[in-house]
Image (tube, grey):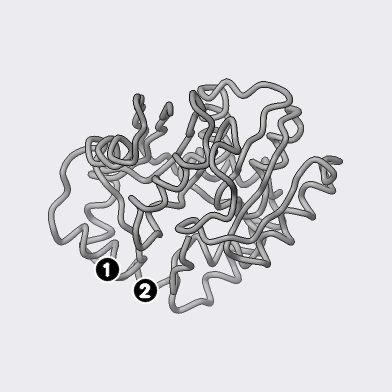
Amino acid sequence: MSEPGFSPFTVWERSGITEHLGGVHATARLLAACQIRPGQAVLNLGCGTGYTAALLAEQQALVTASDINARLLHLTLNRARKAGVSQDVRRVQADAHELSFPAERFDAVIVESVLIFCRAAGQVAAEMYRVLKPGGVLGINEMTYHQPPPADLRAALQETLGLQPRTESEWHTLFKTAGFAAVHSTLYPVKLGEQFMSHLKVDGLGTYLAAVFRNLRDAALLKPFMNETLMSQFTKYAGYGLYICIK
């Protein structure tokens, strides 16, 4: 994917924190829905700090962790080492718009909070379709509008955070246009308590609090919270969706 100029996600990543809507609870739901089996080849695209890649390796999948950010791939290696699965996680630096993998390489592709940052999400979806084997599964977690949002909210998310969420039907259209034969989805609201407990489980209280205090000194991070439209409308219209797409 293309690295955004700024988003809360990149700030967390600089601190070595795992961040996507729904946290590890959403990851568990997503992997369960994908029904990945031991020995299957799985691409974790936009792997971030490596939590999901390590978890997949612990479940005996053959994992390729890919991200455009070299530092995040290093953090992925560290996390895999701590989990004792570094030998089972291959790391590849790549732009999701132009993957270097051959066609029909993977049994599954797992993606969490990636397409909302991409300059051409449809192109990325087509690339994921290309590298999947026939019958392969794409499991994806992306920010989703629960109902059509007002234009000013879309603009605020794009201008302040570089995010381009879609409605559930818009995501379905994108995945089906890429070629996927079936798309199943479930929507969830944002729960701050769920996000916090996810950080405690994965990052630990000390690391999390250190990241919070560091980020509070970042003027770019605080700027979106000064946007009245964003703060007043986000939770009313936005949550996240788990999408299971079959090639």
**Corner quadrant of residue 164:** bottom left
| Residue 227, disc | 1
Q: Secondary structure at mark 1?
A: loop
Quick check: 79 left or right of 227? right
Q: Secondary structure at mark 2?
A: helix
**CA separation, marks 2 and 1?**
7 Å
- Looking at the rendered structure, the kind of residue marked 1 is Asn
- Looking at the rendered structure, the kind of residue marked 2 is Lys
Which residue is the extreme one toward the front?
Answer: 103
Residue beneath disc 2: 223
Quick check: 44 left or right of 21? right
Q: Residue at x 52, y 71 (%)?
A: 216
**Corner quadrant of residue 12:** bottom right
For label 2, the crowd category at 10 Å Cα-Cα, with few meaning under 14, some 14 to 19 and many 20 or more, is: few
For label 1, the crowd category at 10 Å Cα-Cα, with few meaning under 14, some 14 to 19 and many 20 or more, is: few
Q: Determine whether label 2 and label 1 are within 8 Å by CB.
A: yes
Q: How many marks?
A: 2
Q: Position of residue 175 (x, y in %)?
A: 33, 38
Q: Position of residue 104 (x, y in %)?
A: 55, 36
Residue closer to the observer: 1 or 204: 1
Tell me the quarter of the image containing the C terminus: top left
